[in-house]
């Protein structure tokens, strides 16, 4: 081999040749072209002879990181139906889904669904066999979450001003604990933090008041039917309905809230008061329908809006001169080119921490599901899941543990998608355009909602 002026070049070139020689002869590069690994070796040799060793290794690592991302994208695009729930006697829209969190040595057992008929339904996670149903008439249940430490404990917020908790192990409809709000509270969003210590719920606007209400969630199964009073409230940071709340995945003191006022607020609830707790306020310029955390160590937040917009911020940049806005798309339907059936709406997002990649989930009115990849340069289609739903998809839940996706929609179907899944028993696919009992809380996807607002650049704490 010809020697190089770069120290250690010969040894590294030999290692590169050995490594690449053991890989498949061809692969699809991010540019979309198909190249041979022999060509890749020549490129690697050229790069190495022109660049310092450290720089070359960084470039090579980036190339393999791209390969990992592409592998995950292929897995997502290759999801297939593994199970389909049986239609219930009282069909309803499936508005929210959560999967129970397993102990380290166990597999999660349950999936719970919030339905438009004011109920929570619980199914076996793998078979999608129906297990339980909870309702609290005349109250309307909004959202569903499992506890992190106990996979049989499930929560939901209620329009009667409470958050209720049930234990699936008990053969009773009665809540094992009730977290009561204040008399005027109508809860439409909630979440429980990573340590299962704090519950936070968001209210509809009543007159001029909108609240984030907090409770101590410890000991939820210790005393049946006990009622807990709030620890306190935040009342100054939003001025309209609080549509979404999401605690940080690994920091139990951090929570983000979204509202129809367009604001996405990040709080540190360890602080003594609301002013000190408010870390960042980001403005989406539209009503927020979904929020989440992303990025390494989950230092980023993002939101989807009711008029199908998307905003993505990096709050780690708050104390720097860099703008915190990573990407802003006023209308994803116009930004992503889909030749066949188009994109009619967004459902939400999922962050794949193995490859540090954010994806959006959207779809069509006929039930097709589009998976979109998010990058600083924009959005791109990863793949489309077909043949599952027959109407608009309203909810989903992603499991990183086994790369599984659960989806629910207006066709009253709960579906489990897995890589290479095979649907053994086909349930009847029926289009179900029912009149929901909670239409005012069911997202309306309408092309007339497209906005012409100009985006604002994000910098500092307010964007």
Image (tube, rainbow, N blue to C red):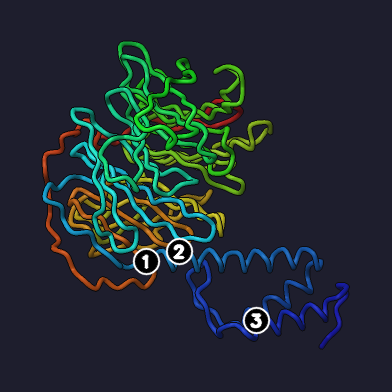
Image disc number at residue 6? none
Tag 1–tag 3 contact (CB < 8 Å): no
Q: Which residue is mark 1?
A: 418
Q: Secondary structure at mark 2?
A: loop
Tag 2–tag 1 contact (CB < 8 Å): yes
Looking at the image, is mark 3 or mark 2 nearer the viewer?
Answer: 2
The earlier-in-sequence mark between 2 and 1 is: 2
**Disc 2 from disc 1: Cα separation:** 8 Å
Of 430 and 98, the residue lying toward us: 98
Q: Position of residue 410 (x, y in %)?
A: 19, 48
Q: Which residue is mark 2?
A: 402
Q: Secondary structure at mark 1?
A: strand
**Disc 1 from disc 3: Cα separation:** 30 Å
The earlier-in-sequence mark between 3 and 2 is: 3
Residue found at the far bottom of this picture: 1
Q: Secondary structure at mark 3?
A: helix
């Amino acid at each position: 081999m010809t020697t190089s002026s770069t120290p250690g070049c010969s040894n590294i070139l030999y290692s590169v040749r050995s490594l690449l020689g053991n890989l498949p002869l061809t692969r699809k590069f991010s540019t979309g072209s198909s190249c041979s690994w022999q060509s890749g070796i020549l490129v690697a040799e050229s790069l190495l002879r022109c660049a310092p060793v450290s720089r070359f290794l960084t470039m090579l690592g980036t190339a393999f990181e791209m390969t990992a991302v592409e592998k995950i994208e292929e897995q997502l695009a290759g999801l297939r139906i593994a199970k389909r729930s049986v239609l219930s006697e009282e069909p309803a829209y499936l508005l929210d889904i959560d999967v129970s969190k397993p102990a380290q040595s166990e597999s999660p057992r349950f999936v719970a669904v919030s339905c438009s008929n004011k109920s929570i339904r619980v199914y076996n996670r793998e078979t999608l066999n129906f297990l339980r149903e909870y309702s609290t008439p005349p109250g309307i249940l909004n959202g569903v979450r499992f506890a992190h430490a106990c996979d049989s404990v499930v929560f939901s917020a209620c329009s009667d001003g409470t958050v209720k908790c049930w234990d699936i192990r008990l053969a009773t409809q009665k809540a094992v604990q009730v977290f009561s709000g204040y008399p005027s509270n109508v809860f439409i969003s909630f979440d429980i933090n990573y340590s299962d210590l704090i519950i936070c719920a968001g209210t509809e606007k009543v007159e001029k008041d909108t609240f984030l209400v907090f409770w101590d969630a410890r000991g939820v199964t210790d005393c049946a039917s006990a009622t807990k009073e709030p620890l306190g409230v935040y009342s100054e940071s939003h001025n309209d309905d609080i549509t979404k709340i999401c605690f940080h995945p690994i920091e139990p003191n951090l929570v983000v809230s979204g509202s129809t006022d367009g604001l996405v607020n990040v709080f540190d609830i360890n602080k003594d008061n609301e002013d000190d707790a408010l870390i960042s306020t980001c403005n989406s310029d539209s009503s927020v329908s979904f929020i989440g955390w992303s990025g390494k160590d989950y230092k980023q937040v993002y939101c989807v809006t009711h008029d199908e917009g998307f905003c993505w911020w990096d709050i780690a940049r708050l104390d720097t001169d860099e703008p915190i806005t990573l990407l802003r798309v006023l209308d994803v339907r116009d930004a992503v080119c889909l030749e066949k059936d188009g994109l009619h709406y967004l459902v939400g997002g999922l962050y794949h921490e193995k490859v540090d990649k954010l994806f959006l989930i959207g779809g069509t009115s006929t039930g097709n599901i589009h998976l979109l990849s998010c990058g600083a340069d924009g959005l791109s289609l990863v793949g489309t899941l077909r043949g599952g739903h027959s109407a608009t998809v309203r909810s989903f839940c992603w499991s990183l543990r086994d790369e599984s996706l659960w989806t629910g929609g207006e066709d009253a179907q709960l579906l489990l998608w897995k890589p290479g899944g095979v649907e053994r028993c086909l349930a009847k696919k029926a289009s179900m355009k029912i009149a929901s009992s909670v239409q005012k809380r069911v997202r309306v996807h309408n092309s007339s909602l497209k906005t012409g607002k100009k985006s604002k650049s994000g910098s500092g704490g307010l964007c």
